[in-house]
Amino acid sequence: YDGATGTVTPTIYERTTAAAMRHEAVNLGQGFPDREGPDWLLDLAARAVADPQVGPPNQYAPGPGLPALRQAVAADVDRRAGVALDPEQQVLITTGATEAITAAILAFARPGGEVLTFEPHYDSYGACAALAGAELVGVPLRGPDFRPDVDALEAAVTERTTMILLNTPHNPTGTVFSAEEMRRIVDLAVRHDLRIMCDEVYERLVFDDAAHPHRTILSTPGAEQVAVAVGSAGKSFSVTGWKVGWITGSATLVNQVRGVKQFLSFSSGPAYQHAVAEGLADDRGFFAENVAELTAGRELLHRGLTAAGLRAHHTEAGYFVVADISPLTDLSGEAFCRLLAEEVGVAAIPVSTLTIRHAASAEDELQKLVRFAFCKRHETIIEGMRRLAERL
Ligand code: PMP
Ligand code: GLN
């Protein structure tokens, strides 16, 4: 957004989806499933609209969220990570994870301060830091496997730093931070008195949980003093349009975020919250089915990209494969994505647009990375890969 001219530049996701529609391209850009969430969950939401028990279902919900959903989130965290949360004090329901992220950054960043994150990073982090009058400072994930370099993170801390933004499982690289990496990051936040917002929207989309287990940051020793964790029903249940999210942590930190949320949206839609509460309590096998479906989609995409001559990275979790285009072309990621949409009929996202430094240097290895989404029906992915094979 340019305040001087009042011009809004749509996000890279919107631009990519618009370009995909314009060129009738297969949309492997924006990360949303092109199939519906589970029928039973959709039915629950539809019925909740007319259910006086959800109540009232079509007027303002309680600001912090429906009690049933706060209890379901707390029970889920306890079941999966052994962390007991008081649903009244330690769980806040938000309008998508996006609002939780915004409210946390507005609560913990300071005008003139710095906010640290690993890059590439989710696009709203920089915009929200700017809204808070702070500067987002990026520390690159270390190649070739995109691991977090905790020493580099600590070296980037200055007296102006107030906050760290983590995202694990990570968009776009699919990295799941290890327990040891999380322990070291929490330890440095405690030592430097920094707050952490940990964006865990892909928490249920881990492909090999034995090899790369994800546990909420709240299970890391010391985290209760410094960290809040963010979740998303949109990602967990493949209903990204519902915009139901949550944030968890100590009563003190969650209360600070709640103070901001009440003036962003005040409250979030009750019927969707009701359905999500029931879904979290009993997912009827959906989470496992979804992981199996995504695992197969990931294989299709990985194989197709490799066959087309790109160097596709292994993805531990989430919706995306990141591929290095340098074995194939001298073009930058941005130029390659333009060519893909316009001439090949496939939309993807240049990773350089998910970094702070993207204008910095043409030599930067991130300039050569492109993100492809596999949270799509298998026939969508197969058609995309067919076009790459025939037209690239
Ligand atoms: N964080 C990350 C890392 C994401 O990829 C997304 C997009 N799905 C969000 C947050 C936003 O989540 P929601 O749709 O629940 O607002
Ligand atoms: N999270 C999705 C992605 O990374 C898109 C979200 C959005 O469009 N804001 O593609």
Image (cartoon, grey):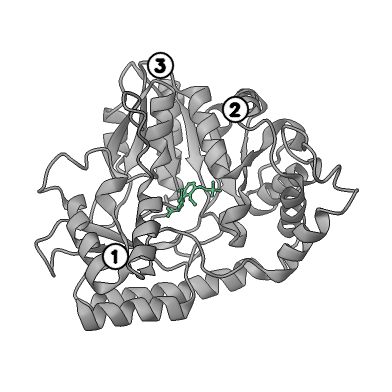
Q: Secondary structure at mark 2?
A: helix
Could you say which quadrant of the image residue 60 lies in? top right
Q: Nearer the viewer, residue 352 or 5?
A: 5
Q: Residue furthest right?
A: 52
Disc 2 designates what residue? 257
Categorize mark 3 by other alpha carbons within 10 Å: few (<14), some (14-19), many (20+): some
For residue 360, above or below residue 254: below
Horizontal and vertical percent position of residue 132:
44, 23
179 relative to 159, above or below: below
Going by the numbered disc 2, the residue's amino acid type is: Val
Mark closest to the chain's N terminus, 1 or 3:
3
Dots 3 and 2: beta carbons under 8 Å? no
Quadrant of image for the N terminus = top left
Q: Which label is found at residue 313?
A: 1
Q: Is residue 276 left or right of residue 212?
A: right
**The disc labelled 3 sits on which kind of residue?**
Pro
- First of labels 3, 2 by sequence position: 3
**Label 3 residue SS:** loop
Q: Is residue 107 visible in this depiction of the protein? A: yes
Residue that badge 3 annotates: 111
Question: Is residue 221 in view?
Answer: no
Marks 2 and 1 sit apart, C-alpha to C-alpha, by 36 Å
